[in-house]
Image: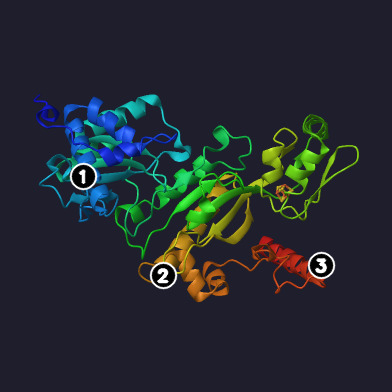
Amino acid sequence: MKDESKDKATHATPILDELEGGKWPSFITGLKHLRDEGTPSNRAIMNDLLGQLEHSYEEKLGFWKGGTISVRGYGGGIIPRFSEVADRFPASKEFHTLRVMPPPGFHYTTDVLRKMCDIWEEYGSGLIAFHGQSGDIMFQGTTSENTQPAFDALNELGFDLGGAGPALRTAMSCVGHARCEQSCFDEQRAHRLMINTFLDEMHRPSLPYKFKFKFSGCGNDCVNAIQRADFAVIGTWRDDIKINQEKVKEHVAKVGRKYTIDTVVSMCPTRAISLNDDDTLEIDNQSCVRCMHCINVMTKALSPGDDKGVSILIGGKRSLKVGDLLGTMIVPFMKLETDEDFEKLEEFGETVIEFFADNALEHERVGETIDRIGLPAFLEAVGVDPDPNMVNHPRTSSYVRTDDFDEEAAKWFERKAAKAQISAE
Ligand code: SF4
């Protein structure tokens, strides 16, 4: 094969070279590696890509424009990029990105990774990003002609396109119970179930705007579900934190009482922890909000309780119409162990997506719809009863009266028990 890269001089990149100077790894070094060590076609593409990027830095302008590129049977998943300076940098004149869904928990075999690299060296620029901010594997830099065969090869390998456009978007789950002792549910099963159920919304988008599912095994929320997902499933527990007092004493003996108080006791957001004189810990579990901080610091002494499940928060998103929103607590606790539990999760997902499809305005995320119509209307629409656990910052909310809180809470528990009895009958 003719080595095209040898025909062209390497573009000088004095401004980009500056970006390699700091102490952190630079993406420029990665691009140059592909330019110098990639396949002949990868080298040509990368040389012109770096040339265009240098030109952009000089002019302080981007020179990419969008368009419409898709593969057969799909309504989203490809980000088209056409160069506006193609006459100067012809090898990278089309630089489309395939957004491909990652496996739940980001578990790959090295064999699969090698095959992905081979596919992208053949049909694309060789440049792959694991993973984009929304979790996708970003196969960056292919031509319009190669988009379909590249997708076919990835699809043959068992992977599907992820989201772009007003569709069900790529979902993400944390590494989960396969490798993390704090995990409170089977994130991988939940992730796979929800994506497979709603895949049509990805292939043939019919939603007003994007909709994302994300799954984190505990309150550490390693995939940022609360900030970024329309439907965030977060592992939690409803019994008491498990305390191994011997390990607490060992911890205190090792780091000291002051350090334990400074880093654990006084960092608890609800002041639920106290350190006894004999170096044992006491936790007021009614006040604990399952934030994971104390468990993160004392991993041997503390761990999540045994009665595990999930909380579901709806409406998290980055800026758009009404600015950044964190997800709103809609289902404070739900068991997620049996087949029936997973069916309930699926049903609830269907209810929320149907609500979104029917009620959201064009280009509106579900969090914005809730903001527009109000939480009570949303709860009624999705068939969820209001619950005191939905109150954000109850200790500082002027709508929560602390003088008769216990009395009101008792009434709520009574109503809840009566309702449970009626549905059991
Ligand atoms: Fe406090 Fe968070 Fe620990 Fe609960 S999990 S006791 S809220 S630090």
Does residue 303 appear in this view?
Answer: yes
Expressed as whole percent of the image width and height from the top left, the position of residue 55 reads 21, 47
Q: Callout 1: 10 Å neighbours few (<14), some, many (20+)? A: many
CA–CA distance in space, label 2 to label 3? 38 Å
Q: According to the image, label 2 marks what residue?
A: 360
Q: Nearer the viewer, mark 3 or mark 1?
A: 1
Disc on res. 52: 1
Element carrying mark 2: loop
CA–CA distance in space, label 3 to label 1? 66 Å
| Left or right: residue 338 compared with residue 237 | left
Expressed as whole percent of the image width and height from the top left, the position of residue 326 reads 54, 60
Q: Please, what is the three-letter code of the amino acid marked with disc 2?
A: Ala
Disc on res. 33: none
Callout 3 touching callout 1 (CB < 8 Å):
no
Q: Please, what is the three-letter code of the amino acid marked with disc 3?
A: Asp
Q: Which residue sits at x=83%, y=33%? A: 249
Element carrying mark 3: helix
Q: Which residue sits at x=77%, y=46%? A: 265
Q: Nearer the viewer, mark 1 or mark 2?
A: 1
Q: According to the image, label 3 marks what residue?
A: 406
Front residue (pair 137, 111): 137
In this rendering, the answer to whether 58 lies above or below 150 is below
Task: Please tell me which of labels 3 and 1 falls first in the chain.
Answer: 1
In this rendering, the answer to whether 138 lies above or below 329 is above
> In which quarter of the view is residue 16 placed?
top left
Task: Please tell me which of labels 1 and 2 falls first in the chain.
Answer: 1
Q: Which residue sits at x=65%, y=64%? A: 392
Q: Which residue sits at x=80%, y=51%? A: 284
